[in-house]
Image (cartoon, helix red, strand yellow):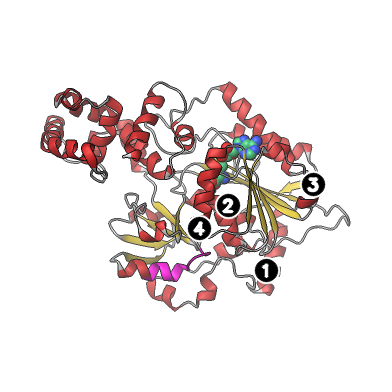
Amino acid sequence: MALYLKAAEVLDKVEQKKGAVKTLVYDSGFENIKQLYALVCETQKYSSVLQQIIESTRLLKETKLRLSLAKVLVYDLLFGRGVKCGGSWKAMMVKHRSRLQAALARIKVKQKVSRNEDLLPPSVQDKNAHSIPRYVRVNTLKTTVEDVIDYLKREGYSYQGTARRIEDLRHLSGKMFMGDVHLRDLLVFSAKMDFHNHYLYKAGHLILQDKASCLPAYLLDPPVGGHVIDACAAPGNKTSHLAAVMKNKGKLFAFDLDAKRLSTMSTLLLRAGVTCHQLANQDFLKVDPLAPEYKDVKHILLDPSCSGSGMVCLPDGGSEEQDGERLQALSAFQLHCLNHALRFPQLQRVVYSTCSIHSQENEEVVSACLEKNPGFRLVHLFPEWPERGHGPLTQCLRASTTETLTHGFFVAMLERQTTPSDGESLDIAPSAMDLATSAPTGGEEQQTQRPSSEISVEQPNFTTKKKRRNRKKHKKQES
Ligand SMILES: C[S@@+](CC[C@H](N)C(=O)[O-])C[C@H]1O[C@@H](n2cnc3c(N)ncnc32)[C@H](O)[C@@H]1O
Protein backbone atom coordinates (compact mmCIF):
# COMPACT_ATOMS: atom_id res chain seq x y z
CA MET A 1 0.00 0.00 0.00
CA ALA A 2 2.82 2.35 0.93
CA LEU A 3 4.37 1.84 -2.52
CA TYR A 4 1.20 2.93 -4.32
CA LEU A 5 0.67 5.92 -2.04
CA LYS A 6 4.24 7.10 -2.55
CA ALA A 7 4.08 6.53 -6.30
CA ALA A 8 0.86 8.55 -6.53
CA GLU A 9 2.42 11.31 -4.45
CA VAL A 10 5.48 11.47 -6.73
CA LEU A 11 3.29 11.42 -9.86
CA ASP A 12 1.27 14.36 -8.52
CA LYS A 13 4.42 16.36 -7.87
CA VAL A 14 5.90 15.53 -11.28
CA GLU A 15 2.73 16.70 -12.98
CA GLN A 16 2.78 19.91 -10.97
CA LYS A 17 6.42 20.32 -12.13
CA LYS A 18 7.68 20.32 -8.56
CA GLY A 19 10.83 18.44 -9.53
CA ALA A 20 12.39 15.69 -11.57
CA VAL A 21 11.20 12.11 -11.06
CA LYS A 22 14.59 10.92 -9.90
CA THR A 23 14.95 13.64 -7.28
CA LEU A 24 11.38 13.26 -6.05
CA VAL A 25 11.76 9.51 -5.75
CA TYR A 26 15.00 9.84 -3.79
CA ASP A 27 13.50 12.50 -1.57
CA SER A 28 10.39 10.43 -0.89
CA GLY A 29 12.12 8.53 1.91
CA PHE A 30 10.68 5.29 0.53
CA GLU A 31 12.87 2.32 1.32
CA ASN A 32 12.80 0.57 -2.05
CA ILE A 33 13.77 3.44 -4.28
CA LYS A 34 14.25 1.36 -7.41
CA GLN A 35 10.83 -0.23 -7.12
CA LEU A 36 9.21 3.15 -6.63
CA TYR A 37 11.17 4.67 -9.51
CA ALA A 38 10.19 1.85 -11.86
CA LEU A 39 6.50 2.09 -10.93
CA VAL A 40 6.40 5.87 -11.39
CA CYS A 41 8.25 5.69 -14.72
CA GLU A 42 6.10 2.90 -16.11
CA THR A 43 2.87 4.55 -15.00
CA GLN A 44 4.01 7.75 -16.69
CA LYS A 45 4.74 5.91 -19.91
CA TYR A 46 1.20 4.51 -20.03
CA SER A 47 -0.35 7.66 -18.64
CA SER A 48 -2.56 8.54 -21.61
CA VAL A 49 -3.82 4.96 -22.00
CA LEU A 50 -4.50 4.75 -18.26
CA GLN A 51 -6.43 8.00 -18.40
CA GLN A 52 -8.63 6.65 -21.19
CA ILE A 53 -9.29 3.42 -19.27
CA ILE A 54 -10.09 5.26 -16.06
CA GLU A 55 -12.43 7.71 -17.80
CA SER A 56 -14.27 5.10 -19.83
CA THR A 57 -14.92 2.96 -16.75
CA ARG A 58 -15.82 5.95 -14.53
CA LEU A 59 -13.44 4.47 -11.99
CA LEU A 60 -12.89 7.68 -10.03
CA LYS A 61 -16.61 8.18 -9.46
CA GLU A 62 -17.14 4.63 -8.35
CA THR A 63 -14.15 4.32 -6.10
CA LYS A 64 -13.47 7.89 -4.94
CA LEU A 65 -9.79 7.30 -5.69
CA ARG A 66 -7.79 10.30 -6.82
CA LEU A 67 -6.50 10.17 -10.39
CA SER A 68 -2.80 9.60 -9.63
CA LEU A 69 -3.53 6.75 -7.23
CA ALA A 70 -5.98 5.19 -9.67
CA LYS A 71 -3.31 5.38 -12.37
CA VAL A 72 -0.65 3.51 -10.40
CA LEU A 73 -3.11 0.86 -9.23
CA VAL A 74 -4.56 0.32 -12.71
CA TYR A 75 -1.07 0.29 -14.18
CA ASP A 76 0.03 -2.50 -11.86
CA LEU A 77 -3.21 -4.42 -12.34
CA LEU A 78 -3.19 -4.35 -16.15
CA PHE A 79 0.41 -3.85 -17.20
CA GLY A 80 2.53 -4.58 -14.13
CA ARG A 81 2.77 -7.32 -11.56
CA GLY A 82 -0.89 -7.34 -10.51
CA VAL A 83 -1.87 -5.23 -7.52
CA LYS A 84 0.47 -6.33 -4.75
CA CYS A 85 -1.25 -5.05 -1.65
CA GLY A 86 -3.99 -6.25 0.59
CA GLY A 87 -6.89 -4.32 2.05
CA SER A 88 -9.50 -2.15 0.42
CA TRP A 89 -7.52 -1.16 -2.67
CA LYS A 90 -6.87 -4.74 -3.63
CA ALA A 91 -10.57 -5.56 -3.16
CA MET A 92 -11.51 -2.49 -5.21
CA MET A 93 -9.22 -3.45 -8.06
CA VAL A 94 -10.37 -7.06 -8.04
CA LYS A 95 -13.99 -5.86 -8.14
CA HIS A 96 -13.38 -3.68 -11.19
CA ARG A 97 -10.81 -5.90 -12.87
CA SER A 98 -12.99 -7.29 -15.68
CA ARG A 99 -14.36 -3.85 -16.60
CA LEU A 100 -10.85 -2.43 -16.68
CA GLN A 101 -9.57 -5.34 -18.75
CA ALA A 102 -12.47 -4.92 -21.15
CA ALA A 103 -11.73 -1.21 -21.51
CA LEU A 104 -8.11 -2.01 -22.34
CA ALA A 105 -9.18 -4.62 -24.88
CA ARG A 106 -11.53 -2.10 -26.55
CA ILE A 107 -8.70 0.43 -26.89
CA LYS A 108 -6.50 -2.23 -28.49
CA VAL A 109 -9.21 -3.22 -30.96
CA LYS A 110 -9.82 0.42 -31.83
CA GLN A 111 -6.11 0.99 -32.42
CA LYS A 112 -5.73 -2.35 -34.22
CA VAL A 113 -2.86 -3.53 -32.01
CA SER A 114 -2.38 -6.74 -30.06
CA ARG A 115 0.42 -5.91 -27.61
CA ASN A 116 0.26 -3.47 -24.71
CA GLU A 117 3.55 -1.86 -25.82
CA ASP A 118 1.97 -0.91 -29.14
CA LEU A 119 -0.33 1.46 -27.27
CA LEU A 120 2.58 3.61 -26.16
CA PRO A 121 3.19 6.90 -27.95
CA PRO A 122 5.80 6.52 -30.76
CA SER A 123 8.41 8.52 -28.84
CA VAL A 124 8.21 6.04 -25.95
CA GLN A 125 8.25 3.04 -28.28
CA ASP A 126 11.50 4.33 -29.81
CA LYS A 127 13.05 4.47 -26.36
CA ASN A 128 11.76 1.02 -25.51
CA ALA A 129 13.52 -0.35 -28.58
CA HIS A 130 16.70 0.45 -26.66
CA SER A 131 15.37 -0.93 -23.40
CA ILE A 132 18.21 -1.91 -21.16
CA PRO A 133 18.71 -5.30 -19.55
CA ARG A 134 18.36 -5.86 -15.82
CA TYR A 135 21.81 -5.88 -14.27
CA VAL A 136 22.38 -7.60 -10.97
CA ARG A 137 25.64 -7.21 -9.09
CA VAL A 138 26.67 -10.16 -6.98
CA ASN A 139 27.63 -8.93 -3.54
CA THR A 140 30.92 -10.71 -2.98
CA LEU A 141 30.83 -9.77 0.70
CA LYS A 142 28.08 -12.33 1.12
CA THR A 143 28.37 -14.84 -1.69
CA THR A 144 30.12 -15.75 -4.92
CA VAL A 145 29.13 -15.51 -8.55
CA GLU A 146 29.18 -19.32 -8.89
CA ASP A 147 26.92 -19.82 -5.89
CA VAL A 148 24.41 -17.33 -7.23
CA ILE A 149 24.45 -18.97 -10.66
CA ASP A 150 23.89 -22.39 -9.09
CA TYR A 151 21.10 -21.10 -6.87
CA LEU A 152 19.32 -19.49 -9.80
CA LYS A 153 19.74 -22.53 -12.01
CA ARG A 154 18.09 -24.62 -9.32
CA GLU A 155 15.19 -22.19 -9.43
CA GLY A 156 14.71 -22.75 -13.14
CA TYR A 157 16.73 -19.82 -14.51
CA SER A 158 18.73 -20.65 -17.59
CA TYR A 159 22.39 -19.60 -17.51
CA GLN A 160 23.77 -18.82 -20.96
CA GLY A 161 27.46 -18.44 -20.04
CA THR A 162 29.44 -15.22 -20.21
CA ALA A 163 28.49 -12.78 -22.95
CA ARG A 164 31.07 -12.33 -25.70
CA ARG A 165 29.73 -9.05 -27.02
CA ILE A 166 27.40 -6.38 -25.72
CA GLU A 167 24.98 -7.40 -28.47
CA ASP A 168 24.49 -10.81 -26.79
CA LEU A 169 22.76 -9.02 -23.93
CA ARG A 170 19.99 -7.76 -26.20
CA HIS A 171 18.57 -11.20 -26.73
CA LEU A 172 17.81 -12.26 -23.18
CA SER A 173 14.24 -13.22 -22.50
CA GLY A 174 12.19 -15.05 -19.88
CA LYS A 175 14.45 -16.66 -17.28
CA MET A 176 17.61 -16.55 -19.38
CA PHE A 177 20.65 -14.84 -17.89
CA MET A 178 24.34 -14.30 -18.67
CA GLY A 179 27.58 -13.16 -17.12
CA ASP A 180 28.39 -9.63 -18.24
CA VAL A 181 30.90 -9.09 -21.01
CA HIS A 182 32.95 -6.52 -19.04
CA LEU A 183 32.33 -6.87 -15.29
CA ARG A 184 32.70 -10.23 -13.65
CA ASP A 185 30.45 -9.72 -10.67
CA LEU A 186 27.58 -8.70 -12.86
CA LEU A 187 24.80 -10.96 -14.08
CA VAL A 188 22.47 -9.81 -16.80
CA PHE A 189 18.79 -10.64 -17.23
CA SER A 190 16.00 -9.53 -19.53
CA ALA A 191 14.70 -6.01 -18.97
CA LYS A 192 11.47 -7.35 -17.49
CA MET A 193 13.07 -9.42 -14.74
CA ASP A 194 12.19 -8.12 -11.30
CA PHE A 195 14.24 -9.27 -8.32
CA HIS A 196 12.77 -6.99 -5.68
CA ASN A 197 10.97 -9.85 -3.99
CA HIS A 198 13.68 -12.42 -4.54
CA TYR A 199 15.28 -13.99 -1.49
CA LEU A 200 18.84 -13.28 -2.73
CA TYR A 201 18.03 -9.59 -3.08
CA LYS A 202 16.32 -9.35 0.28
CA ALA A 203 19.26 -11.13 1.91
CA GLY A 204 21.74 -8.66 0.41
CA HIS A 205 23.40 -11.23 -1.85
CA LEU A 206 22.31 -9.36 -4.96
CA ILE A 207 22.46 -5.62 -5.54
CA LEU A 208 20.22 -4.24 -8.27
CA GLN A 209 22.54 -1.78 -9.92
CA ASP A 210 22.87 -0.58 -13.49
CA LYS A 211 26.07 -1.71 -15.18
CA ALA A 212 27.30 1.83 -15.81
CA SER A 213 26.92 2.67 -12.14
CA CYS A 214 29.19 -0.28 -11.27
CA LEU A 215 32.06 1.28 -13.21
CA PRO A 216 33.24 3.88 -10.65
CA ALA A 217 34.05 1.50 -7.78
CA TYR A 218 35.31 -1.14 -10.18
CA LEU A 219 37.74 1.24 -11.85
CA LEU A 220 38.80 3.06 -8.70
CA ASP A 221 39.79 -0.38 -7.41
CA PRO A 222 41.01 0.64 -3.94
CA PRO A 223 43.29 -1.88 -2.25
CA VAL A 224 42.15 -4.19 0.52
CA GLY A 225 42.79 -2.30 3.76
CA GLY A 226 43.00 1.11 2.07
CA HIS A 227 41.51 4.39 3.28
CA VAL A 228 38.84 5.60 0.88
CA ILE A 229 36.31 8.42 0.71
CA ASP A 230 32.91 8.15 -0.95
CA ALA A 231 32.18 11.86 -1.10
CA CYS A 232 28.48 11.96 -2.06
CA ALA A 233 27.49 8.49 -1.07
CA ALA A 234 23.76 7.99 -0.54
CA PRO A 235 21.89 5.78 -1.22
CA GLY A 236 25.06 3.77 -1.20
CA ASN A 237 25.24 1.27 -4.04
CA LYS A 238 28.72 2.45 -4.95
CA THR A 239 29.71 2.44 -1.28
CA SER A 240 28.76 -1.20 -0.90
CA HIS A 241 30.60 -1.96 -4.14
CA LEU A 242 33.71 -0.23 -2.80
CA ALA A 243 33.44 -2.24 0.40
CA ALA A 244 33.26 -5.43 -1.65
CA VAL A 245 36.38 -4.45 -3.60
CA MET A 246 38.14 -3.67 -0.29
CA LYS A 247 36.90 -6.98 1.16
CA ASN A 248 35.43 -4.99 4.04
CA LYS A 249 38.94 -4.15 5.25
CA GLY A 250 40.33 -0.67 5.72
CA LYS A 251 38.31 2.52 6.17
CA LEU A 252 35.54 3.75 3.98
CA PHE A 253 34.46 7.29 4.90
CA ALA A 254 31.05 8.00 3.35
CA PHE A 255 29.54 11.48 3.35
CA ASP A 256 26.17 12.79 2.32
CA LEU A 257 24.26 15.97 2.98
CA ASP A 258 20.87 14.34 3.04
CA ALA A 259 19.93 12.72 6.34
CA LYS A 260 16.94 10.83 4.91
CA ARG A 261 18.98 9.29 2.16
CA LEU A 262 21.69 8.40 4.65
CA SER A 263 19.24 6.53 6.80
CA THR A 264 18.08 4.49 3.77
CA MET A 265 21.74 3.92 3.02
CA SER A 266 22.43 2.69 6.49
CA THR A 267 19.77 -0.02 6.09
CA LEU A 268 21.09 -1.01 2.67
CA LEU A 269 24.68 -1.28 3.91
CA LEU A 270 23.57 -3.39 6.85
CA ARG A 271 21.75 -5.72 4.50
CA ALA A 272 24.81 -5.89 2.24
CA GLY A 273 27.04 -6.86 5.17
CA VAL A 274 29.25 -3.76 4.89
CA THR A 275 31.20 -3.09 8.06
CA CYS A 276 34.26 -1.04 7.05
CA HIS A 277 32.33 2.19 6.60
CA GLN A 278 31.90 5.32 8.65
CA LEU A 279 28.82 7.34 7.65
CA ALA A 280 28.66 11.08 8.20
CA ASN A 281 25.79 13.45 7.53
CA GLN A 282 28.16 16.11 6.33
CA ASP A 283 28.81 18.47 3.44
CA PHE A 284 31.81 17.01 1.62
CA LEU A 285 32.94 20.52 0.76
CA LYS A 286 33.34 21.19 4.47
CA VAL A 287 35.40 18.08 5.18
CA ASP A 288 38.89 19.24 6.10
CA PRO A 289 41.40 17.45 3.83
CA LEU A 290 44.14 18.11 6.37
CA ALA A 291 42.30 16.49 9.30
CA PRO A 292 44.39 13.65 10.78
CA GLU A 293 41.72 10.98 10.16
CA TYR A 294 42.05 11.46 6.40
CA LYS A 295 45.82 11.46 6.27
CA ASP A 296 45.92 8.01 4.65
CA VAL A 297 43.13 8.58 2.14
CA LYS A 298 44.50 7.67 -1.27
CA HIS A 299 41.29 6.98 -3.18
CA ILE A 300 38.15 9.07 -3.56
CA LEU A 301 34.95 8.24 -5.37
CA LEU A 302 33.03 11.37 -6.29
CA ASP A 303 29.54 10.83 -7.67
CA PRO A 304 27.94 14.21 -6.96
CA SER A 305 24.39 15.40 -7.58
CA CYS A 306 23.78 15.91 -11.28
CA SER A 307 20.92 16.56 -13.68
CA GLY A 308 20.21 12.83 -14.00
CA SER A 309 19.72 13.37 -17.73
CA GLY A 310 21.19 9.93 -18.49
CA MET A 311 18.51 8.07 -16.56
CA VAL A 312 16.15 6.41 -19.00
CA CYS A 313 12.65 6.84 -17.84
CA LEU A 314 10.25 9.16 -19.44
CA PRO A 315 8.98 9.76 -22.95
CA ASP A 316 10.45 13.22 -22.96
CA GLY A 317 13.86 12.02 -21.82
CA GLY A 318 13.45 12.50 -18.14
CA SER A 319 11.38 15.65 -17.88
CA GLU A 320 14.33 17.07 -16.00
CA GLU A 321 14.47 20.78 -16.43
CA GLN A 322 17.72 21.11 -18.26
CA ASP A 323 17.74 24.86 -18.41
CA GLY A 324 21.07 26.56 -18.73
CA GLU A 325 21.01 28.07 -15.27
CA ARG A 326 20.43 24.76 -13.53
CA LEU A 327 23.18 23.03 -15.48
CA GLN A 328 25.53 25.89 -14.75
CA ALA A 329 24.82 25.66 -11.02
CA LEU A 330 25.28 21.89 -11.06
CA SER A 331 28.54 21.99 -12.97
CA ALA A 332 29.91 24.71 -10.69
CA PHE A 333 29.09 22.51 -7.69
CA GLN A 334 30.60 19.43 -9.33
CA LEU A 335 33.81 21.30 -10.15
CA HIS A 336 34.00 22.62 -6.62
CA CYS A 337 33.69 19.04 -5.28
CA LEU A 338 36.31 17.69 -7.67
CA ASN A 339 38.78 20.44 -6.83
CA HIS A 340 38.13 19.79 -3.15
CA ALA A 341 38.78 16.06 -3.57
CA LEU A 342 42.21 16.78 -5.02
CA ARG A 343 43.19 18.65 -1.86
CA PHE A 344 43.60 15.48 0.22
CA PRO A 345 47.36 15.33 0.70
CA GLN A 346 47.90 11.59 0.05
CA LEU A 347 45.34 11.27 -2.72
CA GLN A 348 46.43 9.08 -5.60
CA ARG A 349 43.28 8.59 -7.63
CA VAL A 350 39.85 10.08 -7.81
CA VAL A 351 37.01 8.70 -9.89
CA TYR A 352 34.47 11.28 -10.94
CA SER A 353 31.12 10.07 -12.27
CA THR A 354 27.70 11.39 -13.17
CA CYS A 355 24.50 9.95 -14.63
CA SER A 356 24.30 12.96 -16.90
CA ILE A 357 24.75 13.11 -20.65
CA HIS A 358 25.66 16.81 -20.67
CA SER A 359 29.28 17.71 -21.47
CA GLN A 360 28.84 20.65 -19.15
CA GLU A 361 28.63 18.27 -16.17
CA ASN A 362 31.19 15.84 -17.54
CA GLU A 363 34.12 16.65 -19.83
CA GLU A 364 33.89 20.37 -19.10
CA VAL A 365 34.11 19.82 -15.34
CA VAL A 366 37.10 17.52 -15.75
CA SER A 367 38.91 19.89 -18.15
CA ALA A 368 38.40 22.84 -15.83
CA CYS A 369 39.68 20.80 -12.89
CA LEU A 370 42.79 19.62 -14.74
CA GLU A 371 43.54 23.17 -15.76
CA LYS A 372 43.47 24.21 -12.13
CA ASN A 373 45.38 21.16 -10.89
CA PRO A 374 48.33 20.52 -13.22
CA GLY A 375 49.70 17.91 -10.81
CA PHE A 376 46.94 15.51 -11.88
CA ARG A 377 46.32 13.77 -15.18
CA LEU A 378 43.61 11.64 -16.73
CA VAL A 379 43.91 7.88 -16.71
CA HIS A 380 43.02 6.16 -19.95
CA LEU A 381 40.22 3.91 -18.74
CA PHE A 382 39.15 0.53 -19.99
CA PRO A 383 40.45 0.53 -23.59
CA GLU A 384 37.83 -2.03 -24.69
CA TRP A 385 34.91 0.09 -23.52
CA PRO A 386 33.14 1.15 -26.71
CA GLU A 387 31.92 4.60 -25.79
CA ARG A 388 34.49 7.26 -24.95
CA GLY A 389 34.39 10.74 -23.48
CA HIS A 390 33.86 13.54 -25.96
CA GLY A 391 37.13 14.58 -27.63
CA PRO A 392 39.73 15.41 -26.64
CA LEU A 393 38.88 13.64 -23.34
CA THR A 394 38.70 10.17 -24.84
CA GLN A 395 40.46 8.72 -21.79
CA CYS A 396 37.09 9.01 -20.03
CA LEU A 397 34.11 6.69 -20.49
CA ARG A 398 30.59 7.36 -21.51
CA ALA A 399 27.69 4.95 -21.45
CA SER A 400 24.31 5.01 -23.14
CA THR A 401 21.26 2.92 -23.92
CA THR A 402 22.29 2.53 -27.55
CA GLU A 403 26.02 1.74 -27.30
CA THR A 404 26.49 0.05 -23.95
CA LEU A 405 22.88 -0.95 -23.10
CA THR A 406 22.96 0.99 -19.87
CA HIS A 407 21.69 4.28 -18.54
CA GLY A 408 23.57 7.34 -19.76
CA PHE A 409 26.70 7.77 -17.63
CA PHE A 410 30.14 9.37 -17.52
CA VAL A 411 33.30 8.29 -15.69
CA ALA A 412 36.70 9.95 -15.45
CA MET A 413 39.69 8.98 -13.34
CA LEU A 414 42.29 11.53 -12.30
CA GLU A 415 45.56 10.46 -10.77
CA ARG A 416 48.38 12.38 -9.18
CA GLN A 417 51.31 12.63 -11.55
CA THR A 418 53.94 12.68 -8.84
CA THR A 419 53.96 11.76 -5.20
CA PRO A 420 53.97 14.85 -3.01
CA SER A 421 57.36 13.92 -1.55
CA ASP A 422 59.68 12.32 -4.08
CA GLY A 423 58.54 13.45 -7.49
CA GLU A 424 58.39 9.83 -8.72
CA SER A 425 55.62 8.58 -10.92
CA LEU A 426 53.05 6.62 -8.92
CA ASP A 427 52.86 2.89 -9.30
CA ILE A 428 49.19 2.26 -9.86
CA ALA A 429 48.16 -1.05 -11.38
CA PRO A 430 44.88 -0.94 -13.25
CA SER A 431 43.92 -4.30 -11.85
CA ALA A 432 40.19 -3.79 -12.28
CA MET A 433 40.81 -3.21 -15.93
CA ASP A 434 43.16 -6.17 -16.17
CA LEU A 435 40.51 -8.40 -14.77
CA ALA A 436 37.80 -7.04 -16.97
CA THR A 437 39.87 -7.29 -20.15
CA SER A 438 40.89 -10.82 -19.33
CA ALA A 439 37.33 -11.88 -18.53
CA PRO A 440 36.83 -15.33 -20.00
CA THR A 441 34.12 -15.53 -22.61
CA GLY A 442 33.21 -19.17 -22.55
CA GLY A 443 29.87 -20.85 -22.30
CA GLU A 444 28.39 -22.46 -19.26
CA GLU A 445 30.74 -25.41 -19.22
CA GLN A 446 33.81 -23.25 -19.26
CA GLN A 447 32.37 -21.08 -16.53
CA THR A 448 31.75 -23.96 -14.18
CA GLN A 449 35.19 -25.43 -14.78
CA ARG A 450 37.03 -22.27 -13.87
CA PRO A 451 38.50 -22.30 -10.37
CA SER A 452 36.66 -19.95 -8.06
CA SER A 453 39.80 -17.90 -7.44
CA GLU A 454 39.74 -16.76 -11.06
CA ILE A 455 36.19 -15.61 -10.89
CA SER A 456 36.50 -13.27 -7.96
CA VAL A 457 37.02 -9.65 -8.96
CA GLU A 458 39.11 -8.78 -6.00
CA GLN A 459 41.92 -11.30 -6.28
CA PRO A 460 44.83 -9.60 -4.55
CA ASN A 461 47.34 -11.97 -6.10
CA PHE A 462 46.33 -11.55 -9.69
CA THR A 463 49.60 -12.51 -11.39
CA THR A 464 52.17 -9.93 -10.49
CA LYS A 465 53.98 -10.41 -13.78
CA LYS A 466 50.88 -9.63 -15.70
CA LYS A 467 50.25 -6.63 -13.50
CA ARG A 468 53.70 -5.31 -14.29
CA ARG A 469 53.21 -5.91 -18.01
CA ASN A 470 49.88 -4.13 -17.91
CA ARG A 471 51.28 -1.28 -15.91
CA LYS A 472 53.77 -0.68 -18.69
CA LYS A 473 51.04 -0.90 -21.31
CA HIS A 474 48.90 1.39 -19.21
CA LYS A 475 51.65 3.98 -18.93
CA LYS A 476 52.28 3.85 -22.68
CA GLN A 477 48.63 4.54 -23.32
CA GLU A 478 48.81 7.63 -21.19
CA SER A 479 51.87 9.11 -22.81
C1 LIG B 1 24.14 10.99 -7.45
S1 LIG B 1 23.79 10.90 -5.79
C2 LIG B 1 24.94 9.74 -5.20
C3 LIG B 1 24.59 8.31 -5.49
C4 LIG B 1 25.49 7.33 -4.77
N1 LIG B 1 26.88 7.57 -5.10
C5 LIG B 1 25.16 5.89 -5.08
O1 LIG B 1 25.78 5.29 -5.94
O2 LIG B 1 24.24 5.33 -4.46
C6 LIG B 1 24.41 12.37 -5.16
C7 LIG B 1 24.34 12.50 -3.65
O3 LIG B 1 25.11 13.64 -3.29
C8 LIG B 1 24.57 14.18 -2.12
N2 LIG B 1 25.14 15.53 -1.96
C9 LIG B 1 24.82 16.66 -2.60
N3 LIG B 1 25.62 17.68 -2.21
C10 LIG B 1 26.47 17.16 -1.30
C11 LIG B 1 27.55 17.70 -0.54
N4 LIG B 1 27.89 18.98 -0.64
N5 LIG B 1 28.21 16.88 0.30
C12 LIG B 1 27.87 15.57 0.42
N6 LIG B 1 26.86 15.02 -0.29
C13 LIG B 1 26.17 15.79 -1.14
C14 LIG B 1 23.08 14.12 -2.38
O4 LIG B 1 22.37 14.17 -1.17
C15 LIG B 1 22.96 12.77 -3.09
O5 LIG B 1 22.65 11.78 -2.15
- Viewer-side label of 2, 4: 4
Horizontal side of 447 relative to 364 (left or right) equals left
Q: Which quadrant of the figure contains the N terminus?
A: top left
* Residue 184 magenta-highlighted: no
- Pinpoint residue 198: horizontal percent, then vertical percent: 35, 57
Q: Earlier in the sequence, mark 3 or mark 1?
A: 3
- Viewer-side label of 1, 2: 2
Residue lying at 78% horizontally and 43% vertically, measured from the top left: 343
Mark 2 and mark 4 in contact? Answer it, CB < 8 Å.
no
Q: Residues within 10 Å of mark 4 (few under 14, many from 20)?
A: many
Mark 2 residue CB less than 8 A from any atom of ligand 1 = yes
- Pinpoint residue 293: horizontal percent, then vertical percent: 76, 52
Residue type of the residue flagged with mark 3: Ala
Q: Is residue 93 visible?
A: yes
Q: Earlier in the sequence, mark 2 or mark 4?
A: 2
Q: Residues within 10 Å of mark 2 (few under 14, many from 20)?
A: many
Q: Earlier in the sequence, mark 1 or mark 2?
A: 2
Horizontal side of 100 relative to 84 (left or right) equals left
Magenta region, residue range: 140-150
Residue type of the residue flagged with mark 2: Thr
Q: Which residue is mark 4?
A: 272
Q: Which mark is residue 291?
A: 3
Mark 1 and mark 2 in contact? Answer it, CB < 8 Å.
no
Say which of 148 and 429 sits in front. 148
- Pinpoint residue 147: horizontal percent, then vertical percent: 42, 70
Mark 2: secondary structure = helix
Q: Which residue is mark 1?
A: 467
Q: Which residue is mark 2?
A: 239
Q: CA distance from mark 3 to mark 1?
A: 33 Å
Q: Which mark is residue 376?
A: none
Horizontal side of 218 relative to 318 (left or right) equals right
Q: Residues within 10 Å of mark 1 (few under 14, many from 20)?
A: some
